[in-house]
Image (cartoon, rainbow, N blue to C red):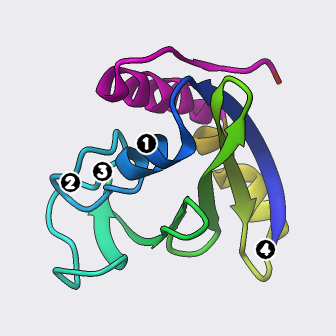
Amino acid sequence: MTELLELRGVVEATPDRVAEVLLDARPGGRSPIAATGSARPAKGDEFTVTRDGSTITVTIDRDNRSLVQQGEWWYRGVTSVEPDERGSLVVHRIFNVAPQHGWAVRFVSRGPIQAAPTAFAKLLGGLGERLDCAAYPLPA
């Protein structure tokens, strides 16, 4: 597994409050990255959803305040919440989990990697809005 990108941002609320919203990611949940459509199975902290034609497996780890989204063959996104003097540090990492075809991953990952900073800023904004607090990305 190779890390391709790391993004960091602050949400000025306690880690428990941020995680409570972020990890409510089942369809219809409060998380800005909540899945749409239906999830299988209907309950639990590990489920699959279809997003933009791809099947995504979502795993929620409440003890570690993290959420993993894994795509069909190369993509793994891990979003976690850590304590910070300003409230919470939200970290999003994108990994290549493909066992082979490194050249293909470099090609197909360009779009998701280029889109990630905007999507991450929207995630932070959504968390700040739901928690009624400041939220902002940190410079790379």
User: Mark 1 belongs to which amino acid?
Assistant: Arg
What residue is pinned by disc 4? 101
Q: Nearer the viewer, mark 1 or mark 3?
A: 1
- Asked if the residues shown at circle 3 and circle 2 are in contact, with their CB atoms under 8 angstroms apart, the answer is yes
Query: Alpha-carbon neighbours of circle 1 within 10 Å: few (<14), some, or many (≥20)?
Result: some
Horizontal side, residue 42 vs residue 139: left or right: left
What residue is pinned by disc 2? 36
The residue sitting at 64% across, 69% down in the picture is 74
What residue is pinned by disc 1? 17
Horizontal side, residue 71 vs residue 39: left or right: right
What residue is pinned by disc 3? 34
The secondary structure type at the circle numbered 1 is helix
Q: Quick one: label 2 or label 1, which is nearer the N terminus?
A: 1
- Span of residues in magenta: 114-139
Judging depth in this view, the residue of 71 and 22 nearest the camera is 22
The secondary structure type at the circle numbered 4 is loop
The residue sitting at 80% across, 51% down in the picture is 4
Residue 51 picture quarter: bottom left
Residue 16 at what x, y percent from top left? Answer: 49, 48
Residue 39 at what x, y percent from top left? Answer: 21, 72
